[in-house]
Image (spheres, grey):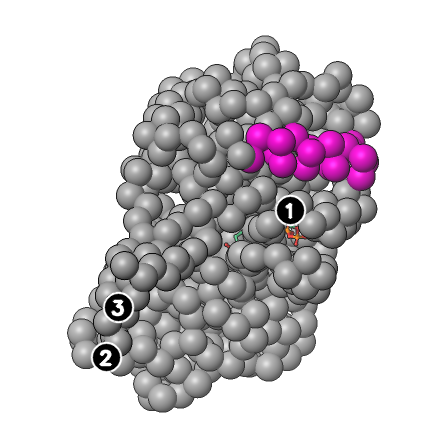
Amino acid sequence: MPVTAARIDEVLASVPSGLFIGGRWSAGRGDLPVEDPATGSVLTSVTDAGPEDGLRALDAAVAAQPAWAATEPRARAEMLRRAFELLVARTEEFALLMTLEMGKPLAEARGEVAYGAEFFRWFSEEAVRVRGSWSVAPSGGTRLLTMKQPVGPVYAITPWNFPLAMGTRKIGPALAAGCTVVMKPAAQTPLTMLALAQVLAEAGVPDGVINVVTTTRSGEVSAPIIADPRLRKLTFTGSTAVGRTLIGQSAQQVLRTSMELGGNAPFLVFADADLDRAVDGAMLAKMRNIGEACTAANRFLVHESLAPEFSRRLAERMQALHVGPGIEEGVQVGPLVDAGAVRKVSELVDDAVQSGARVVTGGTPVDGSGHFYAPTVLTDVPPTADMFGEEIFGPVAPITTFASDDEAVLLANDTEYGLVSYLFTRDLSRALTVSEALQTGMVGVNQGIVSNPAAPFGGVKASGLGREGGAEGIDEYLETKYVGISL
Ligand code: NAP
């Protein structure tokens, strides 16, 4: 069914425009405009918080912390479970909100609701499985008791590219562990998080346990929160540059930090790969979220014997993609988030072409309103091109070749980033040997997607610290206390 203007108005009107602090909505100030990247027009406006609002949110989180930590794990679990069910029931509303404020096609936005909601279900199950240990000291006598306790109030900062899932991936484990949260979504996509606060309140989460502050003054609002000794944990998803600044600020109070930062994923296709699967995997790894994902394949490294056929098939598939506003039926590639993103992708493509790359398809922005870039395949990209060193964050697939496994691994690891790699081969021994050699926190073998709430997501090197999801996800919000006991 096509999305009507009346439906858009209805969904936008259902989102509160104020800040959510201590269980109350403040009156909306309307000084933070939210833009539709498909048209460049303003959708609605919310509140542009200042530093005093951020500190009020921290006050509320600090006040709610003791009672939340003391709430029975089963009760916390059931609230998260209810939030999961409410989110799933409102899939269409959340999907439309994300498409409107971020640009991704509706089908992908629905996928994000399913993925994002799953973190609430997963951590509702983990909330009742937090365990310590009991052992006898090696020398006998003393008994060693370890217990897990919530870290304390958490400050969470999320990016615009997955407005829902990057939030639920933090809120789920934090609430499950017994931590309260101040959440600051990206300025470009505040609506989804405001709507999520409504869901959490409706699910029974007590006042002050989750607080949402929307702002364009991220640095000004965040610095006093991070400097406040009452805050005990900072969890951030975003660029490596901002992550570095936040790690520096966190040093002052010796905060626990989780950092989900940038990526530069290599996508390796070995000579024995199943080419159909490799091309399917490439489409997923490259085009999920219009290429605006930290996990996006950023460098295609293809064995020289397969490169011509792989490039031809990938270009055919990329060329056939339907580009347009995400709310339109059948659209597979939405706009980039803003004009700056289109400029950056254009510069990276121009640099690659000047360095000797060949454009097989695409290679230019799409004319007209909105921030669209044509799905692009480049071959003969020299490893020295800028796009092999930086995140492209757009629908561009650069291909280069390798001759041996050693060369493939060397090329793959030749980056400061270490989030995820993908590899395609039919040889199990090669798959495992290469997986061991790749310097990334995650590896996809014969698959173009690794995100899974039941698995530990995260990077090494400049891609970050800590893991989100899986059994490890809740540990990020727990301290281990040891008690030595003489009987
Ligand atoms: P970004 O510019 O680093 O912004 C991320 C968040 O940090 C936003 O909420 C932003 O607020 C805020 N921020 C910016 N400067 C800040 C400061 N000085 N103090 C406190 N907060 C500050 O990243 P982005 O462009 O939104 O997102 C894209 C990046 O995120 C890419 O590098 C991508 O790889 C990475 N990412 C990583 C993962 C992962 O799991 N590893 C997942 C998704 C995305 P404003 O909106 O106000 O600028």
Disc marking residue 430: 2
Estimate the spatial distance between the alpha carbons at disc 2 and disc 3, rounded to whole Å.
49 Å
First-in-chain label (1 vs 3) = 3
Using the image as rendered, state which of residue 217 and residue 304 is in the foreground. 217
The image shows residue 40 at horizontal and vertical percentages of 72, 34
For marks 2 and 3 on the same chain, the one whose residue lies earlier in the sequence:
3
Q: Are the residues tagged 2 and 1 within 8 Å (C-beta)?
A: no
Query: Is 131 placed left or right of 87 in the picture?
Result: left
> Which secondary structure lies at badge 3?
loop
In the image shown, does 319 or 101 lie closer to the viewer? 101
Q: Residue at x 72, y 56 (%)?
A: 343
Element under label 1? loop
* Residue visible at 72% across and 48% down in the picture: 228
- Closer to viewer: mark 2 or mark 3: 3
User: How many C-alpha atoms fall within 10 Å of the one at disc 3: few (<14), some, or many (≥20)?
Assistant: few
Is disc 2 placed on a helix, strand or loop? helix
Q: From which residue to which does the magenta span run?
A: 48-65
Tell me where residue 457 appears, x and y as whole percent: 41, 56
Q: Is residue 482 above or below residue 210?
A: below
Which three-letter amino acid code belongs to the residue tagged 3?
Gly
Residue holding disc 3:
141
**Residue appearing at x 75%, y 27% in the figure:** 47
| Residue to which mark 1 is pinned | 231
For badge 1, the amino acid type reads Leu
Task: Find residue 406 and report its image quarter.
Answer: bottom left
- Can residue 48 be spotted in the picture? yes
Dot 2: within a 10 Å radius of its alpha carbon, few (fewer than 14), some, or many (20 or more) residues? some
Q: Quadrant of residue 15?
A: top right
